[in-house]
Image: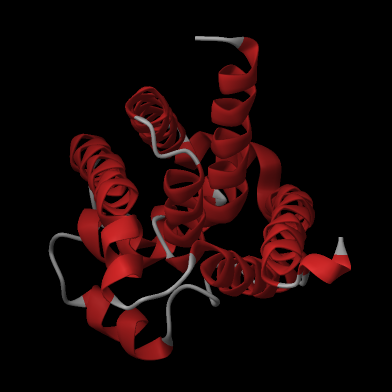
């Protein structure tokens, strides 16, 4: 594995972290699990991280098949995915947590569901449209088996990181406070916006060669 591949995997990891924004989701996680004891909360964190890994790996492996089925070119999907990432990024930079990933109906339904680790935590709050779009773009851009295994490994490391952060969520939220969480969310939004613009620019250059 050369340095270029390591850079790709690192860029993918940073992009996922910005798209998922687990630090921004922490207050929601603490709120949803307020009725649980520490053991149950840790189990919920484990379930959520496992579900995130499963959702993103399936997106990685089946994303290109989905594009082919609907006759959508990778470059068109890059532009669409980039616009989606930029839209989510602007919401994050305005300090709105989770509103771009979960509508009011999903929020009301989640109250009555016992398995909140899968819904709404894993889907749509953590593995939402932005993370799935980013995963499909990287899978299509680097389709060989070595890169695919590397991207799967990156997803697994990322999911393990989410598990660790969610386990520490009550302490982190208490330490950072809402202001600290909002600052980090805005920074992640800025990174996500830059990633989205990069997707859009690459897609447009391929769709309209005269722009390059």
The quadrant in which residue 153 appears is top left
Q: Residue at x 32, y 82 (%)?
A: 106
Q: Nearer the viewer, residue 3 or 173?
A: 3
Residue 13, given in percent of the width and then of the height, sits at 55, 35
Left or right: where 202 falls relative to 156: right
Q: Where is residue 113 drawn, in percent x and y?
A: 15, 71
Specify the farthest residue to the front. Answer: 210
Residue 96 position, x and y percent, is: 65, 72
- Number of callouts: 0
The answer to whether residue 42 is left or right of residue 137 is: left
* Of the pair 31 and 65, the residue shown nearer to us: 65
Answer above or below: position of 175 versus 101.
Answer: above
- Up-down relation of residue 61 to residue 203 (above or below): above
| Closest to the observer, 107 or 193 | 193
Snapshot quadrant of residue 97: bottom right
Specify the color scheme. secondary structure
**Quadrant assignment, res 154:** top left
Residue at 47 percent across and 41 percent down: it is 170
Report the side of 62 relative to 23 (left or right). left
Tell me the quarter of the image containing the C terminus.
bottom right
Residue 181 seen in the figure: yes
The residue depicted at 28 percent of the width and 44 percent of the height is 57
Q: Position of residue 145 (x, y in %)?
A: 32, 28
Residue 95, can we see it?
no
Is 143 located above or below residue 94 in the figure? above
| Residue for point 74% across, 55% down | 198
Return the residue found at the far left.
114
């Amino acid at each position: 594995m050369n340095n270029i591949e390591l850079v790709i995997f690192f860029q993918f990891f940073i992009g996922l972290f910005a798209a998922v924004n687990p630090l921004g989701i922490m207050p929601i996680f603490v709120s949803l699990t307020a009725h649980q004891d520490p053991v149950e909360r840790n189990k919920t964190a484990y379930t959520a991280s496992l579900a995130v890994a499963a959702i993103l790996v399936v997106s990685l492996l089946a994303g290109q098949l989905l594009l082919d089925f609907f006759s959508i070119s990778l470059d068109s999907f890059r532009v669409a995915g980039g616009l989606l990432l930029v839209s989510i990024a602007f919401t994050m930079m305005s300090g709105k947590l989770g509103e771009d990933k979960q509508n009011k109906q999903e929020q009301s339904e989640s109250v009555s569901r016992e398995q909140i680790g899968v819904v709404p935590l894993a889907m749509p709050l953590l593995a939402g449209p932005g993370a799935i779009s980013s995963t499909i773009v990287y899978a299509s851009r680097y389709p060989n088996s070595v890169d695919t295994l590397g991207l799967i490994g990156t997803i697994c490391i990322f999911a393990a990181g989410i598990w660790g952060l969610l386990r520490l969520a009550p302490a982190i939220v208490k330490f950072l406070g809402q202001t600290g969480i909002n600052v980090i969310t805005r920074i992640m939004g800025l990174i996500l916006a830059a990633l989205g613009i990069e997707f859009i620019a690459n897609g447009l250059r391929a769709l309209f060669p005269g722009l390059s």
